[in-house]
Amino acid sequence: MKKNIPTLDDIVSLAKRKGFVYPSSEIYGGLAGVYDFGPRGVELLNNLKRSWWKANVYDKENYFGLDSGMFKHPKVWEASGHTKGFADPLAECRECNTRIRVDKELGNIGVIADEKMSEEVINTLFDEHRKEIACPKCGKKNFTAVRAFNLLVKSNLGDFTSEGNEPVYLPGEASQGIYLNFKNVVDTLQPKIPFGIAQIGKAFRNEISPRNFLFRAREFEQADTQYFVRPNENKDAYEQIKQDRWNWYLSLGIREENLRWHQHENLVFYAKDAWDIEYNFPSLGFDELEGIHDRTNYDLTQHQEFSGVDLRYTDPETGEKYVPWILETSVGMGRMFMAVICDAYREDELGGEKRVYLALAPHLAPVRAAVFPLLKNKPELVAKAREVYVHLKKAGIVVAFDDNGNIGKRYRRQDEIGTPACITIDFDTLTDDTVTVRDRDTGEQERVAISDLLGKLG
Ligand code: GAP
């Protein structure tokens, strides 16, 4: 029995059971579209962020990191176009008031639609098919007309009057923090164009129907790069960026057959060209993992106009002034996390026993190695095992200690969270300072000197 394609339920169940992801506020019945990362999940998430940061900041010569505040001046979202254009098509069931996202419901019955279609076009499509779409709650087919529902989440930050000031929104996309700091970065570091700014930041969206685990959440993190280029010098850089992003997913161990490109026909208000890298999510099929957008000079022009501040770049050699064009990459950390776990999920039989394991790349695994004393009731084995455990821990390796149950059970527990190596301290260890190191994927064991362990784990 071998299974490399899980269902979404397999993933959600493993994520909960093994401490990767919990629904938010679970003891109060949960809060739709919000999730918490548990002890295993936060390690995997941090490893992904570290890898992303390395690839997009440290490995590049002309990219700079940033961490901007979440709250921004109310005018930012007006200038960006989000207060008007950032909306999904919504219809409401006349019988039970359940709200549906019309483009998704049309998609479910095989009609091609997306959230960027005009209100008129999607209303026409919906009218043609409304008799085929049943309310997910009451089953009736009696919906209102489609209207655009704005996704921005309002806060009452700084609102101390009963009438209310202009609302301060939570970020609808993380990228705006980068545009707002473009001038700061230019003034303080004097980078030469082309250059990029990278940031991992939170985004909040009032999604009409959050669903499919971390895929469509109301609170999520986006890992963004914004690359500033000379006007009209976007083509080659865009192709290079697309290629880099594709290769990066391969470097995470994702199988290439589970990735594909999708070019958008209906463009979001800020984009001139938009490509998605799609991942073949279990139970959902291919869907957007990361968006790569050619945003032209839209963003900086808008902020220049609304703020009255000159955001043009001055070429240090020619003195030429221009508003740079922007090439964006943006991926939800939750979708990346989901894609990595889904791709690593395996079921097989080892030593006559069924098991589930995660074939995670070692640099992503939440626990790099686990240390076991062969027997729990032999103090000399336990003491030696703790010595090895502390030795690895002090070297900065994320390591677990487990003396609970038989060795087979301990292996299975580590397999399920993707621990690449299990180290057992046995009676030979006491005399020759060697241990067995068992490989997660093959189950094969080899004898390694304790002094060589760090080199082996890398
Ligand atoms: N700044 C561009 C931007 O925000 P987007 O296509 O709306 O573009 C970029 O979002 C990425 O953010 C998506 O490719 C996806 O990975 C992630 N994302 C968007 N909405 C999401 C949601 N509701 N839940 C989880 N991730 C989401």
Image (spheres, grey):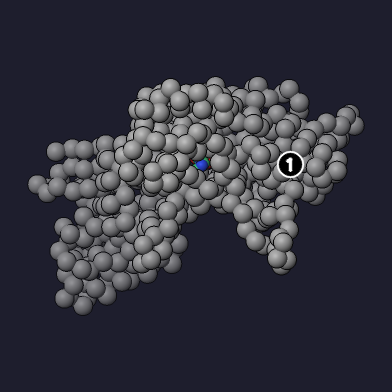
Q: Is 281 rendered above or below residue 410? A: above
Where is the N terminus found, in terms of image quarters?
top left
- How far from the left and from the top, in percent, is residue 263? 52, 23
- How far from the left and from the top, in percent, is residue 9? 28, 46
Q: Quadrant of residue 281?
A: top left
Most foreground residue, 123 or 209: 123
Q: Which residue is mark 1?
A: 79
Tell me if I can see residue 447 in this picture: no
Q: Residue furthest right?
A: 319
- How far from the left and from the top, in percent, is residue 341? 35, 45
Q: Is 347 rendered above or below residue 116? A: below
Residue sitting at 34 percent across and 45 percent down? 137
Tell me if I can see residue 103 in this picture: yes
Q: Residue furthest bottom?
A: 379
Most foreground residue, 74 or 227: 74
Q: Is mark 1 within 8 Å of ligand 1?
A: no
Residue sitting at 44 percent across and 63 percent down? 395
Question: Which class describes the residues within 10 Å of circle 1: few (<14), some (14-19), or many (20+)?
Answer: many
Report how many numbered discs are placed on residues in the image.
1
Q: Under tag 1, what secondary structure?
A: helix
Q: In this image, 77 relative to 281: left or right?
A: right
Residue sitting at 66 percent across and 50 percent down? 66
Type of amino acid under label 1 = Ala
Q: In this image, 287 relative to 440: left or right?
A: right
- How far from the left and from the top, in percent, is residue 409? 17, 59
Q: Is 388 rendered above or below residue 213? A: below
Most foreground residue, 389 or 292: 292
Residue sitting at 80 percent across and 42 percent down? 306
Q: Quadrant of residue 425?
A: bottom left
